[in-house]
Image: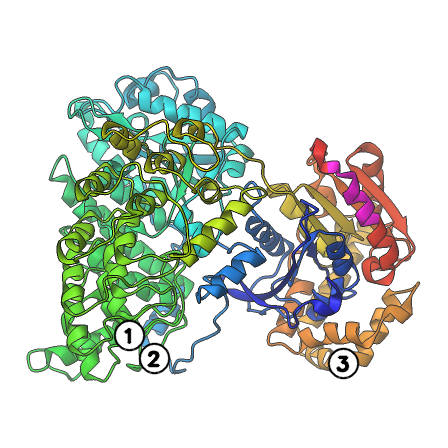
Amino acid sequence: MTWGELQFPAPAEEWRGHQIRCITAAGDGSKQIQIVLVHGPLGGNPGFGGSIEYWRRLFPVLSEEGYTVHAFDLLGLGLSEKPPMEYSIELWAEQVKDFLTKLGTENVAWPREAGLVERALFFFLGRSLAMSWVGSVCSPSRSTKLADYAASVARTNKRSMAGGAGAGGLLFPMHVVAVDLMLRFSDVRPHEELLAEGLLTMFVEAMGQAIFVSHQWLSAKHPDPKGLQFRVLQDALRNILSGASKISIDVSTEIFFGRPAINSAAKMRSTPLFVWYDYFSCPQHPESKKLREDAIQSIPEYIAKCEHFMVLTPPLNHVEQAEMLSRYSWSERGWCRAERMARELSSEGLVILVQNSTQQTLLPQYESVLYSPGKGHFTVESDREKIAVVTQKMVLKKLMGYLEQGDLHNYRFFLNQQPIRLDSLPAEPLNNLVPDFRTEIDPAVDPKGFALATFMHQNGFLSITEYDKGGWSPLCFAAMNGDPVLVSALLEKKASPNDATKKSKILAHMPNQMTVLCLATCFRNNEALSILLEARAEVNGRDARGDGALHWACVSDNAEGVRILLEAGHDPFMLAGPGASPWATACSTGSIRAAKELLYRVKGLELRHSFFWCLMFHGGSKAMVNTLIDAGADIDERYYTDFTNPAMLLVLRMYSLKHYWSPSRLTLLAHHHFGATPLMFSVMNGHFEAAIVLVKAGARLDLRNARGKTACDLATDMQAPSDLVVLVGNSFGSLISLLAASEQRPKGIVMLNCAVGMNNKNMVKSPKMNNLQRFFAKLALGLVDLIFRSPILDAAFKSFANKEQVSALLKNLYPTNPAAVDDELAEGFVQPSQTPGALDVLRQIYTGNPGPTPMEILAGGRMADLPMKVIWGDQDTLTPIKGDVGSFLTEQAKERSSIDFEIISAGHLPHDENPEAVNKAVLAWLAKEPWRSS
């Protein structure tokens, strides 16, 4: 690909809610390696730093050699958004690490997959990319009582509560067992015995990391009488820690939103690890009832303190009930639902499902939104009151946390979820947190008007037609809340019954353009649903993914909603992406009540491929499989994609090819789908309960798919190699790459003239300085801080932000080839300086924390075996080769065989000043494939 063939301006991406620019050039398939280019500043003036133009000479050469190449703006630099925040090397290292997750590296926060094929597919299907930037939504600029209250909370609260869902302090200490001890346990013993033997530790975060284990007990008196469930946990932890098994991505998450972050395995290996397990950690003796109650009330706090959350659900029979326990029976337990809700409301919301020692799956992060703990099963009915207290405290803490953070959209989103989160619990929603509500409306005379005024005050809206920064209007939140009086009041004030969201909610799996009819249906607010239909809401309206309200009724297992929509004329055969009908959606989500309602009301319902939808996604419960068998679905049906469903055909063919270089649970299923039977799908996707039901029902074991595999063959065919990624950085881009690699290892790094820090403040760490020199250096740096915080910088910045000044600076940085500085390059650096926030970013960078030095990152022989190519321009005056970093890396290259150091004739930007030498050196190093030994 030539430079001229690239798309300019670079396409917009979203990273952590902010816009950046990114360009990817797909290779020709001849090279496995993917190259990520990490830019530095323009000669110490990062406010002008470009990204794509910065790599104009290296990027096309790597692409033409067959490599897949990525280049992107660092947040705050280039053409990226420049939000007011603290910029640091660590922040940019996080951006690089998150970008690596898009490439499918081993340990992968929620950015979408980076592949061009996927982008084309989503465009073909007419879908909004879930993580694309949709811009700010206009809203009135006047302040509201909600905004004022949020500011007050932020001022008065010294400790942020936004990150956790804990319930306000520990009533009982958090007792844990060190993993190395736990792995040696031969049986499951109670808290009192372990405490007496000194095997329990009172956990504090400074000690390391903790895993919270959520599970069902296998008997009424003991969680695991024979230790069968516990041995699965032990073996799974051994395999995760050793790398013998990897945590898979949920299939639907990857199809619609890409691959989320799974840093869990790397985190577990990085520090001492401890386990919280109820039988170990909570008092069990009958005389310890009060202490046990205190421990139970502290569970949300325990979860908030845990880096990891595991759901332990191997398919085992309950001792007394002779019933198989599974992920589905676990999800029906009231306590288990409460634990999962606590996890999903914490800062570390990932939930890892452990079904056997080799299969662990990341569960989607939306299910607690739809399923209240109060709707779960309780062995002891009085536990419902305990759960109510715990849940209400979690809700309050989360709401106050959002207020302190100033995140008003998510505050509203969570505030209006309360009816469903507290459903069937003896607890009232917290609907009057915002003070100073005043109205002249008499609730006895005008109840609708009073309800609407209260809602607008508590939600901080000034207009019926207003959309908040998250793209939601008052009616969107009201439809989710479900108050029929409120919905009626908004409609009477001329809110549109066809209103829809203007942005997606990634963690809730809610796409853009989700109509209020879909929202009311999804949250089972059927009275509100009927009111919207009476107001002539479009019954067959769709969201950006193509789903209608009937699809959402099936997602939330809303059987009454199914009936209402069908009677109102909803198309029962409407297809959404990828080719999913409402029936397919009910099968894929395991929504038994909705499925039975469809079977009862829809004539001519097609059962073909029902097991595929059920077992490819989340529908593999015993009850759902039996429902399909009873309906007459073929238990030995061979699944073949064809042009009757072109969207699914394209999805499966694409991911089948991707399995060769970027395997996942989805790619495995796609790779083996052709000719596969329901039994094969159940094995590949970990639906072991379903597999047992199918075998008992007479499913054939001798059938083979199109690749010649039986179900037994597929059970052992679940492992594949990870991707290969090399980071390439210049200046502090090299430092960012190095820091990112220290926490999320790539297969190699190329560093071009590596900087000592984000700014010059790390110079005081130089061992070459004596105390007097260090004193005067600190004075000089303090003066720089004063200048950069003063109005002087504003005028200097404006006078410098032109092509002539930038060209002159660049020519000083290109000592061997000033002719390489042309108008294209200068304009590429000037343009970012015109974007909002550029000056603030520049000020932040020069006055902020410089971050760690390369010497600190590599201290103690860390990353000794990581392949590194160091290229240094010998005429660099900003980071001279004789400086601290250059000298350090020169010596490291002598001690470490993994470092290849090369000096070329160039200044600070060797890749653009002397591209021939840099391109040749990089390509030669890549051709050696030094990562093979790593």
Q: On the image, numbered disc 2 is attached to which residue?
A: 466
- Magenta span: 921-930
Tell me the quadrant of the picture where the N terminus can be found: bottom right
Separation (CA) of disc 1 from disc 2:
7 Å
Q: Quarter of the image holding residue 491?
A: bottom left
Q: Nearer the viewer, residue 902 or 3?
A: 3
Q: Please, what secondary structure does the residue beneath circle 3 have?
A: loop
Quick one: label 3 or label 1, which is nearer the N terminus? 1
Q: On the image, numbered disc 1 is attached to which residue?
A: 474
Give yes or no for residue 488 being in the magenta stretch.
no
Residue drawn at x 20%, y 77% is 452
Q: Residues within 10 Å of mark 3 (few under 14, many from 20)?
A: some
Residue 802 circle label: 3
Q: Position of residue 14 (x, y in %)?
A: 53, 63
Q: Determine whether, in the image, residue 463 is placed left or right of residue 659.
A: left
Residue drawn at x 25%, y 31% is 693
Separation (CA) of disc 3 from disc 1:
45 Å
- Compared to 310, does 410 lie above or below? below
Q: Nearer the viewer, residue 692 or 53?
A: 692
Outermost left residue: 444
Q: Position of residue 474 (x, y in %)?
A: 28, 74
Q: Nearer the viewer, residue 887 or 410?
A: 410
Q: Please, what secondary structure does the residue beneath circle 2 have?
A: loop
Q: Is residue 208 visible?
A: yes
Q: Residues within 10 Å of mark 1 (few under 14, many from 20)?
A: many
Q: Position of residue 263 (x, y in %)?
A: 51, 42
Separation (CA) of disc 3 from disc 2:
40 Å
Which amino acid, by three-letter code, is at mark 1?
Pro
Q: Position of residue 85 (x, y in %)?
A: 55, 65
Main SS of the magenta part reads helix
